[in-house]
Amino acid sequence: MSSTVSRLDPLLNPLSVTLPGRRVLPPMDPPLKASDDHEDERVQFSYFTHFDEYQRGFNRFLEIVEDAAQADEAYNLYRRLALILDRYQEQSYLLDPFLERMLIPPLQKFKERAKRVVEGKVSVNGKVWQGLPALIYHLIKTRGAKTAVRFFPHTPADLNVALDYLATDEAATPMSWETRYIVLLWLSLVAMLPFDLAQFDRGNAGSTFTRLENAGKNNLEKAGLEREGAALLLTRLYARKDYQGSGALYMFMVWGMTRLIGSDDPFRALGVLHVLCETTKTGSGGQTAEVVYMHSVLKIINESDTLTSNTLVRKWATKLESRLGLCKLPPPKPRKPKGKLLQPALGLFGVEDAPEAQLEEDIDVPDSLDDNLDSLLKALQDRDTVVRWVAAKGLARVAERLPDEYVSQILEAVIELYSTYAFDGSEGSKPLLPISEPTWHGATLACAEFARRGLIGSQHLPVLMGWLKRALHYDPVKITGPVGSNVRDAACYVLWAMARAQDKDSFEPYSLEMARHLVTVSVFDREVHVRRAASAAFQEHVGRTGLFPHGIDTVRKADFFAVSMRRSAFTIAAPQVAEHEEYRGFLINHLITVSLTHTDAAMRQPAAVALRRICEHDLLTLGPTCVPRVAGYLQGSVAFHVHGALLALAELADAYKQSKDPSAEVQRLKIFEYIVNTPSSMFLRWRHGFLLQAACIGLSHSLSNEALAITDVKTPWKDIVWAGIKYRGEGVPEAAAVAMRAASQLVNCNPDLQR
């Protein structure tokens, strides 16, 4: 178990050294706490508590931002304001009531500065001027561009000002990327206004459109955020009604293909893909023959090994693939009622009486959609999570527009991905190879997105539930350590989504089994985010279906905070949940078969304590059934299996020792026999001191007069203790000394010690 580590927020010390002429900022954030899982717990705010402090620094900053003599003070004020905003990065919605007062003044000042620069009334001083664009960008980063752009200036008169300013030296320097990003967002907003661009033409017809298009293309291949602003500008420019059907989008794709052929620049591909994704999102060009040219762009990118080796290129290519599939289908139907497809085949009213069946329309599904679906299914197995997630969402969105029989076929194809590496089926027990992680994660994410939209039919539940049970405990081992937490997290997401979008009666046959699996993962998983995800899924089912036994009481014992610390989840929450017999046996079985044999010692130690505390609910009944199962690992050759068994036997021996029942001594003697009959080779191997330590602890709790009389053993207890005393390692001699002390209370050990 990793210990609690105190760490400071890096924002407390933004500058590692004191720069000349700049003040050191006072602390802006309290130290963060770290749990045993190394997860920071930040302070949660209920409103923008720092607004007054922000406003004071903000007003002073606007006063001096263009004064070269006070550049250092302006910089310090900017850093202070940025630190305040960073504290609300995860709760940015709290800024909404104040956003108008925070954005409009600096944007107005930015616009005035742009006018003066265009008119030549101000000299360019990059060192002074970068403060204001940096603050505006920080506000956009904190709240998001979609929300912040609503406060940008948006009058037709701003068009020429923004275009001319973008061409000035002040906006063209490499360090002015914030300025270019802000201007491109500004232009993208102005381009949406319903006015004729021709009125701003300067002599040549269409010159304004050409200037806007060139402004977007010139920034479309940059590595920074300017690319996103340029893509948004071009998307909205081509989506204007007065330019739809003019061939502008077609010419852009021709330009893009020309730039991509023979190119290995991923940023060039990202810019083109971003524009096409945004274009298909808004609906422009998606219903025409332009889709064919978009497929041509995708083909060029997919044929380049250099481009497809880039994660972001594959992500945007997958997103475009899904949106092209959507463009081939009619608009989405009204949202299906909860559990529409999860009800039995005959429905509540019978086939001829089902109201939904009367509303079902025959959809002409084009054959070319199969290519899109094949690409998305392939992307579900991508090596990067972000690509798999995009593919899962895209596949579910396409399926949402298809008839039920097509949805069923797609879901079957997704479920079949599980069997790619699991040759023993959904109910198998063979360990999976780490290479299966991307495929299993992609398939599970896709099932979650299908479940969230109510697209999983009741006929698929038996097979899917079998695979989900394996996914909840997916934990293959690599040389570098255990992997698969993302698969387990996604499996919790599937069950969480089912609680929200399915019929209660369809899930009821699986409710008890899924409740046991979820509660086990919520208290015994290695990763905190998986424990919390399982707890959230369990709570969602308790609140929406009420099918889980002792649901409210279990949620109270294993809630979001109770499972946040691994040790408390194992040793406090799990024994409390085990008070209910519906979960007790399942928890014990998981501890013995999974947690005690885990490759991480930080899992085996609390698992041994948890097994003891659960057995203490009925020690005389549960103990005798658990001890032989645990002792079976002692005859194996895997060191961490033996270690987990020794730890568990030591804890159970101590529980029997503290028990006042006479029959407990019989079980304690059995534990002693199991320990001393462990092959001696396990204790004498190099770096097996942790086994000696656990064995000595077990001996200290299991030694008795009857035990000392036993001589026909594989490894005499004295040999184990003396090996521990001679071992050069922290903790092992101390444990051996404790065992010797326990023996000296029963028999005279002076001759052995003097020897």
Image (cartoon, rainbow, N blue to C red):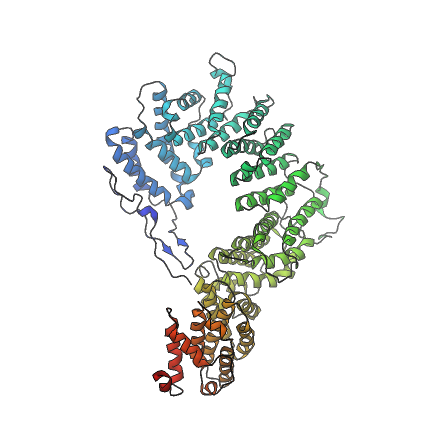
Residue 391 x %, y %: 58, 43
Residue 677 x %, y %: 52, 79
Residue 247 x %, y %: 59, 22
Q: Residue at x 61, y 63 (%)?
A: 513
Q: Is residue 694 above or below residue 377?
A: below
- Write down the quadrant of residue 748 in the picture: bottom left
Q: Residue at x 55, y 46 (%)?
A: 383
Quadrant that contains the N terminus? bottom left
Of residue 145 and residue 749, the one placed in the foreground of this image is: 749
Residue 21 x %, y %: 23, 37
Instruction: Single out the residue that lies furthest toward the right.
Output: 352
Quadrant that contains the C terminus? bottom left
Q: Is residue 99 visible?
A: no
Of residue 601 and residue 189, the one placed in the foreground of this image is: 601
User: With 567 as the anchor, is 348 left or right in this view?
Assistant: right
Q: Is residue 685 visible?
A: yes
Q: Is residue 480 above or below residue 753?
A: above
Instruction: Single out the residue that lies furthest toward the top.
Output: 203
